[in-house]
Amino acid sequence: MNANTPHPWQVPRLQEILSGKKFWGYLDTEALQTRYVLAAHFVKNARNIVEVGGYRDNVITRFLTGTHDSVSVFSLDAEFEPLEQDTLNGAPCRVRHVGDYFQNYTHPTESLGVIVLGIEILGDFEPLCNLMSHADVAVVEVPPDHAPSVECLRAILERGRLSVACQINLDLSPNEAIIGHELAKTNMNVPFWKRNVYVLRPSR
């Protein structure tokens, strides 16, 4: 699929997005960005990092504080901005933010950290499982009230290549009062405030 082709779920609301309406704006809040702080901690020792997903400035690159050989972020969101640079945190690093399907690219297989926050894969699921099969660590975040995300995690664990090494359950619902006015005056999607973060490592 062409990188300029919108994801099927984007088509009905693409014009509204382009006209300045918000849909995932709550992800910009400090509360929801705590997921990235956790993810960055767990992949800090990985030389190569691949994130599947991303929205505006909500990308793992912004939260990494160490040195890495490569950081690649793939997103189909209409508001995602592509980027290429050769340094990160003052050290050499190949950084790519790509507005395309991650399945269209070759990824590192050594010292790999994979991040998928708010996981939901439309289409062929096997490429994600293949990517994760090479990971030393994967951080997967699931809104427990969103059935497609729960199903994705179940499918990953059923394959037996990875198992849960750590689980962190976040209840960010007190933050709804903080952005309640934004929810009321825009067509922003209603947030899933409960978020479970799973750290997966190769099964022994």
Image (tube, rainbow, N blue to C red):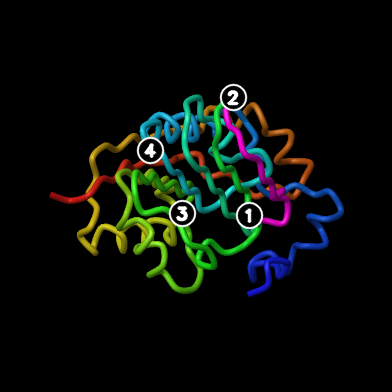
**Location of residue 131 in the rendering, given as x and y in whole percent from the top left corner:** 38, 59
Query: Which mark is drawn over residue 119?
Result: 3
Q: Mark 4 or mark 2, which is nearer the start of the sequence? A: 4
Asked which secondary structure carries label 4, the reply is loop
Residue pictured at 35% horizontal, 64% vertical: 130
Q: Mark 4 or mark 1, which is nearer the start of the sequence? A: 4
**Location of residue 4 in the rendering, given as x and y in whole percent from the top left corner:** 73, 67
Q: Quadrant of the N terminus?
A: bottom right
Furthest-left residue in this view = 204
Residue pictured at 41% horizontal, 39% vertical: 47
Query: Which mark is drawn over residue 90?
Result: 2
Q: Mark 2 or mark 3, which is nearer the start of the sequence? A: 2
Query: Which mark is drawn over residue 40?
Result: none
Foreground residue, 170 or 54?
54
Residue pictured at 59% horizontal, 43% vertical: 95
Report which residue position mark 4 lands on: 46
Report which residue position mark 1 lands on: 98
Residue 176 lies in magenta, yes or no?
no
Q: Mark 1 or mark 2, which is nearer the start of the sequence? A: 2
Instruction: Decide: is 113 above or below 178.
Output: below
Quadrant assignment, res 2: bottom right
